[in-house]
């Protein structure tokens, strides 16, 4: 066989390889441009004590998680037991961002499913969500001691992601 | 019959009572008084992708996020931001993916240049092929014997073998 005939075959195989890899990638996971950047500032009222506020500035000096949730979010139920477990381990403060939710419904939901959050803050109209590049619920961010976003989990946390990615990252960030 | 009259009366009252509400509702919708600003907002939202329903622009999509982002665009136009500033605001939060037309960058060069490259490569290989064909040696000339036979054939000699 002529060597020239191998060229189209080679091109075809490379194309197939690209398409095959593409099959296994999730188009819903859009890489966040905020990773490695300072966590967007906010000052939001707390869910349980609306007179008090919280923002990233209050958490400087520690590694923390921001978990975006809502009482209307079905997928949040999937990851919720993991968050409750993580809260029990008392490794990191978990801040809940109650995204576009009714305060009463949010409180009821936490009472029903357990409250893993150190503090929950209310993002009633979703503006803070936009600043953080949130485009679905749940999403989870890992923020380091300097207030820099280090990781973003899009969609529900799984035991696997938690064990293999998030917990090792938290430990590493806490050491530094 | 009386019931019908009563019903009609209620309906009439309800219609009258509803009208001011309808007017109020129309007022409550955020209308863009400035036609230029409105067309700018539409143009911008046609350039931006809705991240929830990824094959729609935020102008087309009715997802909540798209509505929120449209609100952001309106507010920022009202605040006097330029189109580039608004686009930069979106890209800073959602990345280049939010742009329907990806920017030319080192990572997207292949995407932009790919089609042109394909045409150039295709044309070059076509030229190469045609030239190679032309350069191929012509069919070898006939021997004297063959020429003889051909002449006979053309003369209508039945093409009998001379040999």
Image (cartoon, grey):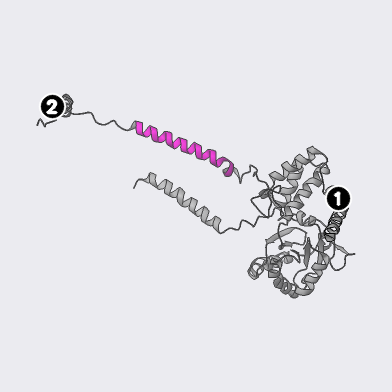
The residue shown at (77%, 46%) is B73
- The residue that disc 1 covers is B19
Crowd class of label 1 (few under 14; some 14 to 19; many from 20; radius 10 Å): few
Label 2 Cα neighbours within 10 Å, binned few <14 / some 14-19 / many ≥20: few
A33 or B24, nearer to the observer: B24
Residue placed at 50% from the left, 54% from the top?
A17
Picture quadrant of residue B130: top left
Which of the marked residues, 1 or 2, is nearer the chain's N terminus? 1
Q: Name the spot of residue A29 as percent of width and height, x first.
A: 64, 57
User: What residue would you read off at disc 2?
Assistant: B157
- Majority secondary structure of magenta residues: helix
- Residue furthest to the right: A51
**Residue sticking out furthest to the front:** B1
Chain identifier of the residue bearing label 2 in the image? B
Q: Which mark is residue B116?
A: none
Q: Residue at x 49, y 50 (%)?
A: A15
* Residue B47 in the image, given as x and y percentages of width and height: 69, 44
Vertical relation: B159 (above or below) A35: above
Q: Residue furthest left?
A: B163
Residue A158 relative to residue A10: left or right:
right
In the rendered view of the protein, which quadrant contains the C terminus of chain A? bottom right
């Amino acid at each position: 066989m002529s060597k020239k005939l191998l060229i189209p075959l080679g091109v075809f195989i490379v194309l197939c390889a690209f398409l095959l890899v593409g099959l296994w990638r999730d188009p819903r996971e859009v890489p966040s441009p905020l990773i490695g950047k300072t966590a967007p500032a906010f000052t939001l009222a707390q869910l349980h004590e609306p007179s008090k506020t919280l923002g990233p500035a209050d958490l400087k000096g520690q590694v923390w998680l921001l978990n975006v949730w809502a009482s209307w979010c079905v997928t949040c139920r999937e990851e919720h037991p993991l968050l409750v477990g993580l809260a029990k381990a008392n490794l990191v403060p978990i801040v809940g961002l109650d995204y576009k939710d009714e305060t009463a419904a949010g409180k009821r939901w936490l009472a029903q499913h357990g409250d893993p959050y150190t503090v929950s803050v209310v993002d009633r109209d979703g503006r803070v969500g936009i600043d953080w590049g949130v485009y679905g619920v749940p999403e989870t961010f890992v923020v380091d001691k300097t207030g820099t976003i280090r990781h973003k989990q899009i969609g529900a946390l799984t035991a696997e992601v938690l064990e293999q990615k998030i917990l090792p990252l938290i430990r590493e960030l806490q050491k530094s | 019959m009386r019931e019908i009259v009563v019903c009609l009366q209620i309906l009439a009252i309800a219609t009258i009572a509803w009208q001011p509400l309808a007017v109020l509702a129309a007022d409550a919708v955020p209308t863009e008084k400035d036609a230029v600003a409105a067309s700018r907002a539409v143009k911008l939202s046609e350039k931006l992708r809705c991240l929830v329903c990824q094959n729609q622009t935020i102008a087309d999509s009715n997802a909540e996020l798209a509505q929120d982002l449209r609100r952001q665009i309106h507010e920022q136009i009202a605040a006097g931001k330029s189109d580039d500033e608004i686009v930069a605001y979106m890209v800073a939060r959602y990345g280049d993916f939010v742009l329907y037309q990806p920017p030319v960058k080192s990572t997207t060069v292949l995407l932009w240049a790919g089609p042109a490259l394909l045409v150039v490569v295709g044309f070059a290989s076509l030229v190469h092929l045609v030239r190679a064909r032309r350069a191929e040696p012509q069919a070898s000339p006939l021997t004297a014997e063959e020429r003889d036979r051909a002449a006979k054939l053309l003369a209508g000699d039945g093409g009998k073998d001379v040999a």
